[in-house]
Image: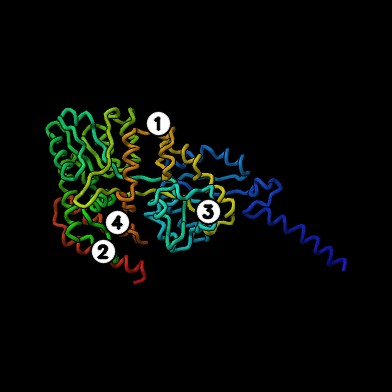
Amino acid sequence: MRKVICLLLIICMVVPVFAGGSSESGSAAASPDKPYAGTHLTVLGFSATVCTAVQDKLDEFYDQTGITVDYEQLSNNELNNRLAVTMAAGGSDVDVFYCQPTVSIGQYTANGWVEPLDGYLDEEVDIDDFMDIAVNQVSVGGKLYGIPVFNEHYVLYYNKEMFEEAGIEKVPTTYDELLETAALLTDASKNVYGITMRGDGYGSVPTWISVARSYGADYFDENGSCTLNSPESIESIEMYKSLLAYCPPGYLSKGWDGTSNDFAQGLAAMRIDCDTQYVYAVNPDSSVVYDKVGFAPLPYGPVKASSIESGWAMCMSAGSLSKGAAWEFIKWATGKEMDVYAATQGNFSARVSTWSDPAVLETYPEDLAAAVLSSSDPAVSDGNSLPDMIHASEARNILGEVFTLAWQGKEYRAALDEATAEIQELYNEDMGL
């Protein structure tokens, strides 16, 4: 009997040791106000202002919680590759990661890589404070799989000085006006062009879809039928192609960085691209037009005004062994105080309240902030830049090949028909049809 009692005592002494070495703390440093003290988290971020802002404040998070964080900032490709490898192995060596919902959330949820967060939500999070589209993008099957941390929209950049010199008093509010203004401001003999837009086939897809939706076109209709070859879609492609005629030379190989440089160096009077890239236009170190930049919402098409809304979110690994501590980190890193700080550093917030904070409004040009909020209006914002399907990246590649033909001035209708059918097949596969 004494041997049995001794054995039980030994077991009781050993079990806490092993429990304390697991993910959730159990450490002697833990207390009621710091229940996860001693826990160590691994967080994978990407190369963005929001990640740098969070990293700046990690010491504060440790002081508040006693949780230590191994915080890695990776390139987008490195992050995706790292997640694919670690999740295939069970995902237990990563607790929190950043995700680009429009590209990855379908794949991640289908593979069971990401933890639903509905059961963790409390009043501190204030999920209603986030922009509707940003929340919708991390919601799958009625469940929430991430907290938005970053949100971007397409807006119109314009050079105020060029407009004044040309006697143009009105910023274009329709695509017909945009085309007319681009023509008036183009003088190839002086190496000055009316507009700059992405002409790289793959890169132009998210820019084109904002134009397309204003024409009443989209990837799919309400019945799940791919409508990329509809008359409305073709009309928007033709408008996009017409605008490219007033772009600086070399537009066929340009993505966002090339168009950013065109505008910042004074080669183009207007530009359509992401609001988050505004810093390159207004920074004296990178722009010769830094003090001449204006911002406005995208123009209206025949049907409506439209702007995509996409960004990044913070997610919890379904394989994490430290889910309680991981949630504490997510709640802190996406909270209102941290969000305002990140916004003052240049992060484009997905929280409505952040855009009314005085410190944030002092950070951004007034007309840019107005364009952001206008683009976030549910009547304007059409959400994802890519189709809502698991194979969204493949669909973008397929459509990008069609645009490569179109922007080169080649016949593209047959290729568009084939792409429509191919993307429909991918969608049916995703839907199990």
Find the distance from the CA under tag 1 to the CA under tag 4.
37 Å
Quadrant position of the N terminus in the picture: bottom right
Residue lying at the far right in this picture: please name it: 2
Secondary element at image label 1: loop
* Circles 2 and 3: CB atoms closer than 8 Å: no
In this picture, residue 186 sits left or right of residue 93: left
> Quarter of the image holding residue 348?
top left
Find the distance from the CA under tag 2 to the CA under tag 3.
36 Å
Instruction: Look at 65% across and 46% down and name the residue there.
Output: 34
Measuring from the top left, give residue 221's x and y in whole percent: 27, 62
> Which of the two discs, 1 and 4, sits closer to the camera?
1
> Which of the two discs, 3 and 4, sits closer to the camera?
3
Instruction: Look at 65% across and 45% down and name the residue there.
Output: 33
Marks 2 and 4, the one that precedes in the sequence: 2
Considering depth in this image, is 238 or 285 the residue closer to the camera? 238
Residue on which disc 4 sits: 396
Q: Amino acid at mark 1?
A: Glu
Residue lying at the far left in this picture: please name it: 189
Marks 1 and 4, the one that precedes in the sequence: 1
Find the distance from the CA under tag 3 to the CA under tag 1.
31 Å
Q: Amino acid at mark 3?
A: Leu
Residue on which disc 3 sits: 121
Find the distance from the CA under tag 1 to the CA under tag 2.
44 Å
Residue on which disc 1 sits: 362
Using the rendered image of the protein, determine whether residue 366 is visible from the camera's viewpoint.
yes
Residue 395 vs 273, above or below: the answer is below
